[in-house]
């Protein structure tokens, strides 16, 4: 169990450093490579199926729960922008200049195309992959909504 936690912390450090080194176009690929890299580099530690399983679950929970929300949550990004401005504050027009609807949708679509989850053909977006981590996230939320009785 301890080795799984150590690996998970190394995974977090690894992908954070990777993201800080430069512009990352495919964050999911960096997360997967970080997962594998840490797994290979820590091969000298005592391995066990349970340890691997716990490590994988921690990484999946992080990607879907924490990392996914940080990347997707407009609320968190706006709060970060306000914190960045400090005592000077920021006006609504300045926020709207950064986060207008057209820009948000274009950025989101560019990310989906960049991650090869969708492609553009004849000015229409199509699903490129049958399996995607983004689809898992959406499926889990849809399932939870059904379980809780939300429409």
Image: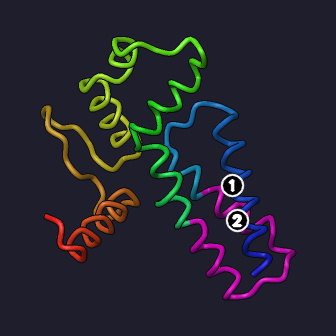
Per the image, is 56 magenta?
A: yes
In the image shown, does 71 or 42 lie closer to the viewer?
Answer: 71
Residue 149: percent from the left, percent from the top?
Answer: 18, 73
Q: Is residue 62 left or right of residue 117?
A: right
Asked if the residue under mark 2 is in contact with the one under mark 1, i.e. CB atoms within 8 Å, the reply is: yes
- Looking at the image, the residue that sits furthest to the front is 87
Image quadrant in which the C terminus is located: bottom left
Residue tagged 2: 8
Residue tagged 1: 12
Per the image, is 69 magenta?
A: no
Q: Which residue shows up at 39% across the image and 19% down it?
A: 95
Q: Which residues are magenta?
A: 33-59
In the image shown, does 77 or 40 lie closer to the viewer?
Answer: 77
Q: CA distance from mark 1 to mark 2?
A: 6 Å
Check the image and report above or below for 128 versus 106: below
Check the image and report above or below for 116 versus 139: above
In the image shown, does 81 or 101 lie closer to the viewer?
Answer: 81
Quadrant housing residue 120: top left
- Looking at the image, the residue that sits furthest to the bottom is 49
Q: Which residue shows up at 24% across the image and 77% down it?
A: 147
How did the renderer colour the structure? rainbow
Q: Residues within 10 Å of mark 2 (few under 14, many from 20)?
A: many
Task: Say what secondary structure mark 2 lies in.
Answer: helix
Check the image and report above or below for 143 versus 108: below
Image quadrant in which the N terminus is located: bottom right
Check the image and report above or below for 9 versus 123: below
Residue 96: percent from the left, percent from the top?
Answer: 33, 18
Q: Is residue 83 left or right of residue 38?
A: left
């Amino acid at each position: 169990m301890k080795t799984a936690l150590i690996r998970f912390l190394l995974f977090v450090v690894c992908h954070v450093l990777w993201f800080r080194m430069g512009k990352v176009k495919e964050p999911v690929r960096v997360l997967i490579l970080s997962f594998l890299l840490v797994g290979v580099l820590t091969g000298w530690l005592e391995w066990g199926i349970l340890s691997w399983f716990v490590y994988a679950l921690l990484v999946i929970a992080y990607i879907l729960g924490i990392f996914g929300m940080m990347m997707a949550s407009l609320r968190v990004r706006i709060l970060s922008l306000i914190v960045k401005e400090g005592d000077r504050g920021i006006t609504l027009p300045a926020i709207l200049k950064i986060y207008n609807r057209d820009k948000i949708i274009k950025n989101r679509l560019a990310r989906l195309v960049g991650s090869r989850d969708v492609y553009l053909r004849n000015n229409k977006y199509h699903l490129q992959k049958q399996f995607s981590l983004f689809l898992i996230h959406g499926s889990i939320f849809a399932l939870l909504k059904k379980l809780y009785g939300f429409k």
